[in-house]
Amino acid sequence: MSYSPITRKGMLRLKEELDKLQTIDRPNVIKAIEEARAHGDLSENAEYHAAKERQSLIMSRIDELQLHISTTQIVDTKGPYKKCVFGATVTIENVYTDEQTTYTLVGPYESDPENGFLSIATPIGKALLGLMEGDGFLVESPNGEEEFRIIHIQ
């Protein structure tokens, strides 16, 4: 079986979300279904159908989280780092626009680029692995080829 890397914080977030879904959200939606059933005719009962749909979404997310948890392996992310590796926080600069962005390199289940967490499975994440401060690299994007330079690794 192939495992995806994950940080301790990432695993904790997955487990906390799973626990909340199993202990709070699922029981609440079951109660909502029971209450909606008490209102009578289920064919025209919007509350019942909404609760059943919510239950389906919750169960799907529980299944997804259980799969993620079972197929990930916690990787120790202690620095300092001299090169780009899993867990490192990297500041890169677009050579053409001078725009700087800082990312922490994480596994696919933790990826959240808008909040600074970039999966090592993305084109930029893959390109960064093994590089050092000052190194440049090219990435193919929907807008064409982009060139970046590593400003800082921490």
Image: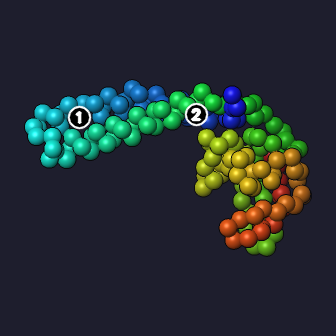
| The label number, if any, that marks residue 68 in the structure image | 2
Q: Which amino acid does label 2 sit on?
A: His
Front residue of 70/17: it is: 70
Front residue of 55/1: it is: 1
Residue 90, image x and y in percent? 77, 51
14 relative position to 73: left or right:
left
Q: In which quarter of the image is residue 150?
A: bottom right
Residue 72, image x and y in percent? 65, 31
Q: How many marks can you see?
A: 2
Secondary structure at numbered mark 1: helix
Q: What residue type is labelled 1?
A: Ile
Answer with mark 1 or mark 2, whichever residue precedes in sequence: 1
Q: Mark 1 points at which residue?
A: 33
Residue shown at 73% from the left, 46% from the top: 120
Task: Note whether residue 12 is visible.
Answer: no
Front residue of 1/95: it is: 1
